[in-house]
Amino acid sequence: MVKVTIIGSTGIIGKNVAFTLAREDTVDEIVMFSRPQSLDKAKGETYDMYDALASRDIDCRLTPSCDFNDITGSQIVLIAAGVHREKGMKRLDLASTNAEIVYYYSKKIAEYSPDSIILVATNPVDVMTTVALKASGFKKSKVIGVGNHLDSLRLKNYFSRQIDINSSEVHTRVIGEHGDHMVPLLSSTTIGGIPLKYFVTYVDLDVRGLIEQLKHAGNTIISKKGATEYGPAFAISNLISTMITDSHRVLTVSNYLEGEIEDVNDVSLGVPAVISKNGVAMIVPIHMNEFEKKMFLEASKTVKEVTDDVFNHLNI
């Protein structure tokens, strides 16, 4: 039996992940965990989802709960609880408030579901990944942040749409911080098997414009509709499904580094990793040019400074 818990299930991201995941019909039970004051809303979400799932003959069990005993036996626990970004806010602006929330829930996960994998979606996700790791005491392979998975999908989509080519032909990746210090790996990007630096000589491709669009993607969506939902929900569900099916796909997630890439230590950043039913099976080595290395090291410095500030705030 495959059981997944979503903490923060009545929020925009949480409920969208639950519905997306239920539709894929790979999970037996999804625990819709919420605060006691939001329990009725969680119940309402499950009733609504059941009505939709009936049209597909999907029997996924949806369990609204505010009782930590109900998360016991979960293979994966998603932390999507926290204060969300508003127009003009940076992800790092949320750090101290959300750290307290993630720290509390990570402690509870370790107590009630010690064999689970923690997947962190709360922003700033790289900082929160380290908070969840330290609070839970889990092995780093079992504490994963959504990281740059969504950024990588967005960049793939941008290239695909601008040159009118099937997205399966675009192989690109974004690493570093899920934020202003993200690092698009353009030096290893290929389109139709052709390295980007050669491909751009044949087509009119505004690479610099696409990167700027990528860096502001979240804020652009928030400014127009108030929140991001479908992109993050599908990216998170994709990560969960990869773990459930033990697919061993290489996805860009936030993971705690201990010198695996450019000797960066004691900070969580987005890096390519092999994802399995046990979490991160391996961090994949990266080839970067000098500019990309510089950007990656800047990202590590920025995220590390905020992480240290957060732990000082938490007094641990």
Image (tube, rainbow, N blue to C red):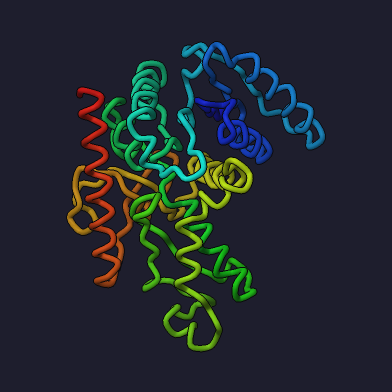
Residue farthest to the front?
88
Tell me: 310 left or right of 211.
left
Query: Measured from the top left, where is residue 193 in percent x and y?
Result: 49, 77
Q: How many labels, in total?
A: 0
Residue 176 position by quadrant: bottom left
Tell me: 256 left or right of 26.
left
Q: Establish if 255 lies above or below 102.
A: below
User: Of 190 and 316, which appears nearest the observer?
Assistant: 316
Residue at point 38%, 54% (across, down):
180
* The N terminus, quarter of image: top right
* The C terminus, quarter of image: top left
Residue farthest to the right?
55
Q: Establish if 166 lies above or below 24.
A: below
Residue 18 position by quadrant: top right
Q: Establish if 243 lies above or below 48.
A: below
Residue farthest to the bottom?
202
Residue at point 27%, 70% (across, down):
291
Residue at point 62%, 36% (across, down):
16
Work out whether residue 76 can be spotted. no
Q: Establish if 70 lies above or below 232.
A: above
Tell me: 48 left or right of 37.
right
Query: Measured from the top left, where is residue 33 in percent x and y?
Result: 54, 20
Query: Measured from the top left, where is residue 265 in percent x and y?
Result: 19, 47
User: Of 92 and 80, which appears nearest the observer?
Assistant: 92
Residue at point 65%, 41% (across, down):
24
Query: Measured from the top left, where is residue 112 in percent x and y?
Result: 40, 16
Work out whether residue 106 can be spotted. yes
